[in-house]
Image (spheres, helix red, strand yellow):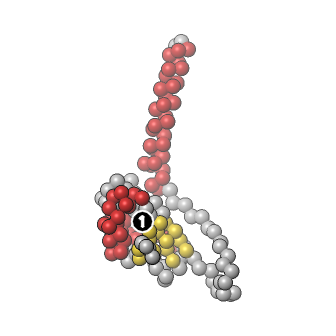
Amino acid sequence: MDRRVFLKRLALGAAAGAVVLPAANSLLVEPRWIEVTRHFVPLANWPRGRAPLAVVQISDIHSGPYMGRKGVAAAVDLCNGLKPDLVALTGDFAHRGLSGLDACAGELSRLDAPLGAFAVLGNHDYWDGAHAVAEALKSAGVRMLTNR
């Protein structure tokens, strides 16, 4: 094989890899990637001797074909296992339509936090139907923080 053919094939292979690898990552890796990061935020007026407030944030569920009921259930189980006082749900429940919304809301209804679960909508939720997403979350017992 001469140098020109080799370089042409190498360029085509690199171009294909530049398309296939990110697509594979977004379809196969990220929907199953749940990360727990712990932060301690000192509050100046927090009563001495009182246990710290435990807040769990869940973001970017993107329910639908790539993140089904099982994936949302895993996130909820992990969250509940952390024993949060409050859960903050920070948007993007929908993904290219509302097909996974009922399953997502069904799993989110299992969130267990004494102070409750609160949510804001993300850009995907507004693109796909903000009212429907908000209503599904409300029916799951999640309190919406829209304009509050």
Towards the viewer: 132 or 110: 132
SS of the residue under disc 1: loop
Mark 1, residue position: 121
Q: Please tell me which residue is depicted at 33% across the width and 75% down the height of the picture.
A: 139
Asked where in the image residue 63 lies, by quadrant, the reply is: bottom left
Q: Give the position of the C terminus as an image quadrant.
A: bottom left
Q: Is residue 80 above or below residue 98?
A: below
Work out whether 5 lies above or below 134: above
Whether residue 119 is visible here, answered yes or no, is yes
Q: Position of residue 72 (x, y in %)?
A: 41, 64
**Residue 52 locus on image (x, y percent):** 62, 80
Residue 126 lies left or right of residue 57; in this view the side is: left
Which residue sits at x=48%, y=46%?
25
Q: Residue at x 45, y 38 (%)?
A: 20
In terms of image quadrants, where is residue 99? bottom left
Residue 103 in sight:
no
